[in-house]
């Protein structure tokens, strides 16, 4: 089979699997997943060509999958994200291939990528076209090729707010470094330092070069100027500062930045903060104050989760008392130490849920809560509550049925 024949056959396979999994032109959730599986198999065929040195054919198959998937997402339920993953997978493999051919491509791979970037499939999905062009940057070996890429910028246009796509700046940086060298690349970075993507690159390079003062300056400046907007979550600059302070053993600043990241919604950073405090011999001294701060800073769910993992059970019990629905998650852990309180919390919450329940699904949820109560504080209390509920709701046959089932199971 020739390369062209294989491409035609693979394209037919893709179209067939899309047709089989479509309903009046639309691909539902389950069908989308099946198509994605088939596309991933075809990507593996392309990778086999690349590994055997048939680079051009491998590229053509990657591009085929990429374009067909982009066409697909306009009329598919991709809520699972599987099509997006296929697009990223294809681009990742194209990127690897371009790096392999950075110094040996005769121009054919480069031409194929630029041709694909002009495909009308990218209309409305220009971000993916820019990512494809970015993958081609390692193939740029002369000014003419660089200009060929730039010629596509007006074709692909800008984002909805008339701002350039971030990849455009990365492409320009890559071309400049390929054709003019690293020093010109650094000058380009400094000239465009207010572009977040380029600032991140300069910070990363400064950290690698151990120019920590300059990297810190760039991060703090970004925070002050609010370069990139982050709503109630840590910024990239915060994570960079954490790296910098870790590498420079600046424990005071490291403590502050870890605490900031923790309070901005990253509960896993509690363990970094605890480890640092233990190293400094301050854990016992700071422990109570830290828990008090966490109680108001990271949200009830995250706070309760940390208390549970840290076996801060007395504090956890108080949280559950304030938020009774949490008993379903922590009742079994608390029941062995605080049986009376946990039993009362279960009873209160179950009674509320039973009163509000009005269909069999919700009656089953009440039954499951009763089972959790039995696991947490013993079957006797759960059975007593079941009998009470049966008396309270004699006119709810579906509820009575679920309660009787649970009662029989608990008695075994």
Image: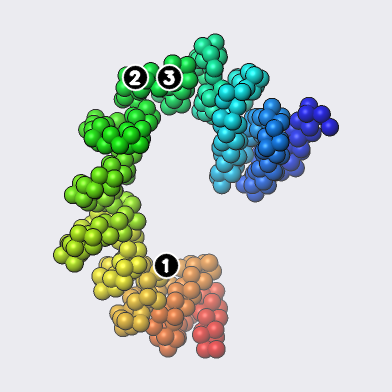
Ranked by sequence position, the earlier of labels 3 and 1 is: 3
Between tags 3 and 1, which lies in front?
3
Taking 363 as reference, is 213 above or below it? above
Q: Quadrant of residue 271?
A: bottom left
Q: Nearer the viewer, residue 215 or 78?
A: 215
Residue count near mark 2 (Cα–Cα under 10 Å), binned few <14, some 14–19, many ≥20? few
Ranked by sequence position, the earlier of labels 1 and 2 is: 2
Between tags 1 and 2, which lies in front?
2
Q: Quadrant of residue 111?
A: top right
Residue count near mark 1 (Cα–Cα under 10 Å), binned few <14, some 14–19, many ≥20? few
Taking the image as shown, residue 164 lies to the left or right of residue 100, namely: left
Secondary structure under the numbered disc 3 in the rendered image:
loop
Query: Which residue bears the numbered disc 1?
Result: 356
Taking the image as shown, residue 15 lies to the left or right of residue 145, namely: right
Residue that protrudes farthest toward the left in the picture: 285
Taking the image as shown, residue 242 lies to the left or right of residue 92, namely: left
Secondary structure under the numbered disc 1 in the rendered image:
helix
In the picture, the quarter occupied by the C terminus is bottom right
Query: Which residue bears the numbered disc 2?
Result: 187
Query: Which residue bears the numbered disc 3?
Result: 181
Secondary structure under the numbered disc 2 in the rendered image:
helix
Residues at circles 2 and 3 in contact by the CB criterion of under 8 Å: no
């Amino acid at each position: 089979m020739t390369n062209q024949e294989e491409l035609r056959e693979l394209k037919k396979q893709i179209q067939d699997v899309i047709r089989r999994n479509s309903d009046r032109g639309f691909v539902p959730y389950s069908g989308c997943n099946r198509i994605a599986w088939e596309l991933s198999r075809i990507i593996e065929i392309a990778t086999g060509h690349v590994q055997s040195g048939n680079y051009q054919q491998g590229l053509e198959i990657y591009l085929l999958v990429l374009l067909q998937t982009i066409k697909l997402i306009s009329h598919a339920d991709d809520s699972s994200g599987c099509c997006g993953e296929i697009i990223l997978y294809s681009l990742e493999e194209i990127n690897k291939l371009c790096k392999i051919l950075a110094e040996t491509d005769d121009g054919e791979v480069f031409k194929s990528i630029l041709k694909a970037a002009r495909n009308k499939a990218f209309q409305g999905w220009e971000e993916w076209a820019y990512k494809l062009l970015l993958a081609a940057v390692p193939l740029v070996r002369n000014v003419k090729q660089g200009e060929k890429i730039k010629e596509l910028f007006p074709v692909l246009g800008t984002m909805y707010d008339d701002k350039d796509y971030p990849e455009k700046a990365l492409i320009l940086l890559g071309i400049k470094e390929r054709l003019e060298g690293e020093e010109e690349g650094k000058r380009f970075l400094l000239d465009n330092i207010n572009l977040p993507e380029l600032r991140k690159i300069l910070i990363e390079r400064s950290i690698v070069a151990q120019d920590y003062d300059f990297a810190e300056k760039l991060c703090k400046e970004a925070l002050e100027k609010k370069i990139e907007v982050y709503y109630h979550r840590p910024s990239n600059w915060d994570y960079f500062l954490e790296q910098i302070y870790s590498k420079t053993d600046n424990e005071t600043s490291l403590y502050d930045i870890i605490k900031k990241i923790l309070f901005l919604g990253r509960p896993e950073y509690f363990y970094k903060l605890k480890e640092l405090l233990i190293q400094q011999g301050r854990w016992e001294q700071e422990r109570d104050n830290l828990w008090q701060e966490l109680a108001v800073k990271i949200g009830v769910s995250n706070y309760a989760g940390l208390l549970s993992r840290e076996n801060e059970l007395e504090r956890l019990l108080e949280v559950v008392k304030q938020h009774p629905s949490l008993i379903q998650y922590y009742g079994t852990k608390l029941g062995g130490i605080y049986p009376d309180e946990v039993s009362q919390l279960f009873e209160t919450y179950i009674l509320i849920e039973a009163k509000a329940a009005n269909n069999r699904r919700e009656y089953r949820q009440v039954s499951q809560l009763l089972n959790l109560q039995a696991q947490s504080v013993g079957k006797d209390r759960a059975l007593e509550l079941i009998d009470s509920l049966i008396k309270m709701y004699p006119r709810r046959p579906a509820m009575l049925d679920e309660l009787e089932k649970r009662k029989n199971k608990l008695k075994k």
